[in-house]
Amino acid sequence: MAPLRVAILAPVSWRVPPRHYGPWEQFASLLAEGLVAKGVDVTLFASADSVTSGRLASVVGRGYSEDPDVEPKVAECLHIAHAFERAGEFDLIHNSFDFLPLTYSGLVETPVLTTIHGFSSPRILPVYQRYNASTAYVAISDADRHPSLDYVATIHHGIDTDAFSLHPSPGGYLLFFGRIHPDKGTAEAIDVAEAAGMPLVIAGIVQDQRYFDERVAPRVDGERVSFVGAVGPEERSELLGGAHSLLHLIGFDEPFGYSVVEGMACGTPVLAFRRGSMGELIEDGTTGFLVDDVEGAVAAVGLAAGLDRVAIRAQAVARFGVARMVADYLEAYAAVV
Amino acid sequence: MAPLRVAILAPVSWRVPPRHYGPWEQFASLLAEGLVAKGVDVTLFASADSVTSGRLASVVGRGYSEDPDVEPKVAECLHIAHAFERAGEFDLIHNSFDFLPLTYSGLVETPVLTTIHGFSSPRILPVYQRYNASTAYVAISDADRHPSLDYVATIHHGIDTDAFSLHPSPGGYLLFFGRIHPDKGTAEAIDVAEAAGMPLVIAGIVQDQRYFDERVAPRVDGERVSFVGAVGPEERSELLGGAHSLLHLIGFDEPFGYSVVEGMACGTPVLAFRRGSMGELIEDGTTGFLVDDVEGAVAAVGLAAGLDRVAIRAQAVARFGVARMVADYLEAYAAVV
């Protein structure tokens, strides 16, 4: 049987895989590589500086978040059109972009499956609703399913668990790992670390400069609270694994959290606010704790050292390995093609 | 012979025709009505509150500039997709939107002709270049032709000259008519009026609030300089015709100027900076004056009263009537279909 021919339409905000930040690009990369390993004929539509063991198809040189000469709207529409103009070459177009590609889907015969990476605003829902009957959707968590849409599956993201190694005993610092933004609860992490009397390391890109300047930077002293900026893939395992616990005190219903499962893959417990997908990712009392407020998080810091870090990693490998994600997507593809 | 079936793809920023401002929507309306009058089977893709004697096709209730609940990017892509998903019903899709619809053109068999209403930035050129060979372009002035693109024609816009009536003698005020923005030279118009010792009336939407606050508002006294805001179609003829001269001291290479030809249709001379399309619209010394600086404009105010306002209107009717535009577009359509 000829291999399945899949076009993966990645965003063109960052390179695939991303150098630092870029969760959608990270997803596209992990999935593409995993599918290639399974014998799928993958064409990755991404910026021209992307790296893949599949075929790379590009009309945009560099991601628009990395190249100020690129007009995002222009890059996006040329990139999407490129994939759809070649639709006849594929058995399936897997859209990992956002809503805009859906509006091209009615003009081609090739089935389109979209991984919905969350709804940035309820105002983008009309596009998903318009193409609900004619295309297929995958949710990245049950928590992120919208009641007005139909889904072929919920598929949690997978990660390359080999890139993260077990740190068998708890380290001496708490860790915040993510975008510096109110959504991610950077200030709450500082509150918890102070109350728990432990140092905090903050890692991530500054996405909300004003929040950083007003709520975070004044409390960074380089000792009790230190800020290390964006952390690339190489240093990630060391930083996550070296932590006592990962604080994930989110201020929104996060549809998935890469750092949550990456931390667990190092054996590090995750202390998270009980909202969004956290209840699906964290087994309360085993791989971390689901808490409701800062006080609950402080109490959980005291309990976290008692968790079995070997078991935490084992569960992360079983539930959030890329192999499981690839198998799930192959099943979803089979339902659509 | 069956009538030609043309889809006109208007923007969805404002209603068609616009209530006040909206030059692209104005173009779409004038063209649609003119084509219907010539027996063309016109389907106008526009917001649902639009008014046309052709067929109206809408998936967006109101223009996104008139309804804060509408997300522009969502409205645009649903609107464009709607037209292209119905491509099989038309002999031609006339794109009067911008560059985004071009990226759907390769997915349908129906020919696409685009009126390029100017280049908001050189960074949008790659889209026009990408679809240069496979679609047809119309320039709205020779001045606006880009050397890297091919055009089927230059077609100056036409207006409903019946909506403007001759004012046979010059009125007592100079007029600025357009968006309040440095591009349009509002501040320069005040300079000229002051130096010429004549009152100035400023009409238009404030597009650059800071420019208005800093450079315009402090000089508005309600007597020598008055600001009347946006002026709807009904009052336009009175205001333009009542002016001594229209000041069009643009700070950019304007590809076309509706107010320039509307003023001329009332017999009002236009004093314009010699750039962009102005040399194509104004016959220097007959329908107005092309000048190079504020001093030149002040001198032209002194000469403008001597121009023949009957001749100015006659030329506007002959060169910029909607009938001429419609005839030109029918010729361009014939070259493409």
Image (spheres, coloured by chain):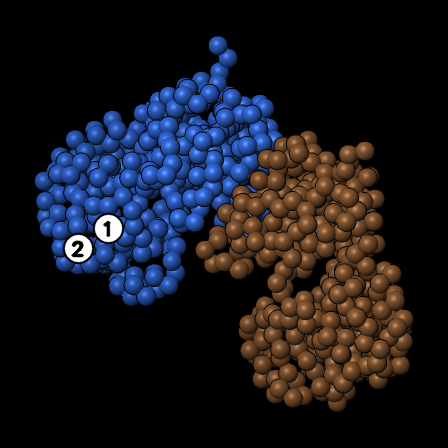
Chain colours: A brown, B blue
> Would you name the residue on which mark 2 appears?
B294
Q: Residues within 10 Å of mark 1 (few under 14, many from 20)?
A: many
Residue drawn at (82%, 60%) of the image: A320
Q: Is residue A221 left or right of residue A254?
A: left
Residue where numbered disc 1 is placed? B249
- Quarter of the image where one finds residue A276: bottom right
Mark 2 element type: helix
In the rendering, at what x and y percent does residue B126 appear?
45, 43
Q: Chain of mark 1?
A: B
Spatial separation of the CA atoms under disc 1 and disc 2: 8 Å
Can marks 1 and 2 be said to lie on one chain?
yes
Q: Residue at x 73, y 71 (%)?
A: A237
Visible in this render: residue A289?
Answer: no
**Looking at numbered disc 1 in the image, what kind of residue is underneath it?**
Leu
Q: Residues within 10 Å of mark 2 (few under 14, many from 20)?
A: some
Task: Label 1, secondary structure: give it.
Answer: loop
Residue type marked 2: Val
Q: Left or right: where does residue B187 sit relative to residue A302? A: left
> Residue A318 placed where, x, y %?
87, 61
Give me the residue at 30% from left, 61% from top: B216
Q: Is B273 rendered above or below residue A171? A: above
